[in-house]
Image (cartoon, grey):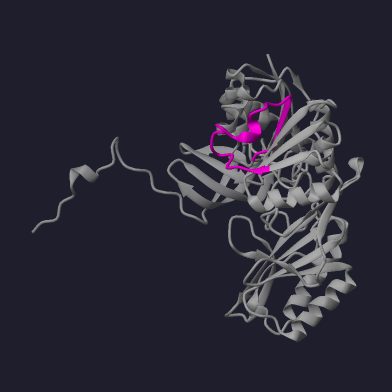
Amino acid sequence: MSKHRSLRFQPAGGERKAQVPVGKKQKLLIERLANDGRGIAFIDGRSWFVAGGLPGEEVEARVLNARSQVVEARAERVLRAVELRREAPCAHAGSCGGCTLQHLPHAEQLALKQRTLAEQLQRLGGVQPDEWVAPLSGPEFAYRRRARIAVRWDVKAKRLDVGFRAAASQDIVAIADCPVLVQPLQPIMRALPQLLRALDKPQALGHVELFHGTQSAVLLRHTAPLGEYDLQRLREFCTEHDAQLWLHGAGEPEADQPGQALGYRLEPWNLELQYRPGDFVQVNGAVNQAMVEQALDWLAPQTGERVLDLFCGLGNFALPLAQQVREVVAVEGVQAMVERSRANAAANGLGNLHFFQADLSNPLAGAPWAAEGFDAILLDPPRDGAFEVVKQIGELGARRLVYVSCNPATLARDTAELVKQGFRLKRAGILDMFPQTAHVEAMALFEAG
C-alpha cells in the first residue's frame, strides 16, 4: 500500500514555521521593555522576550522556551550596551532567579513600575487617577526580612546543594552573599551551607526559611526525624547567631524552645504583631510601615467612625486603624489568621476590633458584620483581587475606600467596577515593596461621587 499524507493535517496558509529550539543562540536588537522588565525584540515574525536586555542594546540570547510566535530567552552576552545599563551589584545576577532588574538603575525600575500601573489602569479599567503620587520606596538593598533557601541532596554527586533557585530552571545556585537580605540575616546565610553539609542526615533536609523581625529565626524543614547530634549542632548555630530555631517535620512548624514567638513592630503606633511560619508577612519592613502610614493618611479615619478592613491578615492595617476610630471590623478568609489577628489585638490592648472569617471570593450577601454599614473601607486582597467583594461595596455605605494591590491587572479590573458603582479614582501610586524585581504593588484611593 502506498503511503499518502491526509490533507486535513496540512497547515493552513502554507508551510508551518519550524519551532525555535531551546538552547539556540540568537543575536537580537532590543526595542523596548515589557512590563516585567524583559527586553522585547522582533525577528522572523516572532516576539522575543529577553531577560537582561535593555532598549537599544544588541545582545546574544539563549532560548529558554518557545511557543508559536513567542520566544522566551536570556541575554548571555551584551554585544552593544546602552548608557542606561549599570553593573549588577550582586555577583549572582543573571544566574539566581530572585532579582531580575539589577542591571537597571533603581530610578528606572520605579519608572517601569509606574508605567505598568498606568497602562493597566488605562487598558483594563479605562481610567487614570485625578492625582499620581510619588512612588513609596525605601532602601533598594538590605530590605528583605524573609527568605526561603532551597536545599537538595544530589544523589549522584553525594552532595548537598544549598542556595536559591536559578533563573528559568530548577537548578540551585550557591549564594555567598545576598545583597537584598536585611543585615542580620547576612551572616546566617553565609554560614548556613557549611552547617547543613555537616549534619549526619543531609538527605532528610527539605528547605530552610530565614526570618527577621523582633528577633532572627531559622526554620528547618525535614522529612525524617533529626538525631540528637544534628539538633545540638543546629541549636549551637542559632545561639551563635542570636536566632530562634524552628523545626518543621510531619506536623506544623514548632519552635525548638517552647514559648518562642516570631514578630515584627509597627513603631509609629507602638504595636507588635506576632506570626507563625507560613503566615503572610510583608518582606519589606520599611516599606510596609510607610505603606500603613500612607493608607491611614489617605483613608483619613475619624474618631467616631466604623471602618471595615477586608483581607485583614495579621492585623497589619486593622490594629493601627483601631487606635484612631470607634470600631474596626476585620475580615479574613483563613480562620487561623483570624485567630492570630484577634490575639494580636488583645496583646496590644485593643478592644474595639471585631474579627470574622469569610470567603471573600464570594459575594458578601447577608454577612451579619456588614449590616450596619461603614464610613470607610480598606482592602488588601491577594493577586486575584477582590472582584466579588467590590461588586457589592457600594451597598455598604462607605464614602472613602483605600485599595492596596499586589497585582495591577486585578486592581485595574476592580477599579472599573468601582467606577461603575459611582466611585472616583482620586489618587494612585506604586509601592516599591520588592526592589530589583519587576513585581508591582500599588495603592489607590476612591471616593464616592
Residue 190 picture location, percent across and down: 81, 67
Residue located farthest toward the left when viewing the structure as drawn: 1
Residue at 76% of width from left, 19% of height from top?
131
> Between residues 103 and 275, which one lies in front from this camera angle?
275
Assign the C terminus to one quadrant of the image: top right
Q: Main secondary structure of the magenta part?
A: loop
Numbered-mark total: 0
> Does the magenta segment cover residue 363?
yes
> Does the magenta segment cover residue 234?
no
Residue 48 picture location, percent across and down: 54, 42
> Between residues 19 and 367, which one lies in front from this camera angle?
367
> Between residues 99 and 399, which one lies in front from this camera angle?
399
Task: Residue 142: tell me if it is visible.
Answer: no
Which quadrant of the figure has residue 127? top right
Q: Which residues are magenta?
A: 356-381
Residue 251 picture location, percent across and down: 63, 69
Q: Is residue 334 left or right of residue 104?
A: left
